[in-house]
Amino acid sequence: MPKITFGDRTITCVEGTTLREALQVEGITPHNGRSRWMNCTGIGSCGTCAVEIHGEVGPLTAMERWRLAFPPHHPSRGLRLACQVKVTSDLVVIKHSGFWGQHVDAPEDD
Ligand code: FES
């Protein structure tokens, strides 16, 4: 079972589970602030579950390419959408600040 490290938590999940679901089952959210309640529930359209991922994951899905291509996201930031990523190996996941988690270069901002 793949391990996911998110902040000070490390969890495991069944291989192939979406990252967002794996986190939420363990009481962890990939969303910041009000986006915990104001989100697309995982269809890939809102962009609020964006995270930085270290570890092997599949290529960007079509939804990720679409949503991460416009503000406040930018494709150069290298973020992924937790609701679209399938967990197949051990991962370290970082959530940046901002409603969408978009502040990759200024993690102290909100
Ligand atoms: S929850 Fe909306 S894009 Fe992932």
Image (cartoon, rainbow, N blue to C red):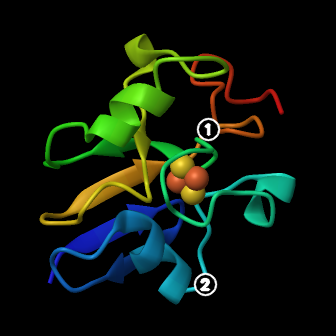
Q: Residue at x 64, y 17 (%)?
A: 71
Classify 10 Å Cα crowding around label 2: few (below 14), some (14-19), many (20 and above): few
Real-space Cα separation, disc 1 to disc 2, in angstroms: 18 Å
Q: Circle 1 is placed at which residue position?
A: 96
Q: Circle 2 is placed at which residue position?
A: 27
Mark identifier at residue 15: none
Residue type marked 1: His
Q: Is residue 9 above or below residue 73?
A: below
In the image: residue 57, left or right of residue 83: left
Name the image quarter holding residue 14. bottom left
The answer to which of 89 and 49 lies nearer the viewer is 49
Residue type marked 2: Gly
Q: Ligand 1 within 8 A of label 1's CB?
A: no
Q: Is residue 59 above or below residue 106?
A: below
Q: Ligand 1 within 8 A of label 2's CB?
A: no
Q: Residue at x 67, y 21 (%)?
A: 72
The answer to which of 4 and 79 lies nearer the viewer is 79
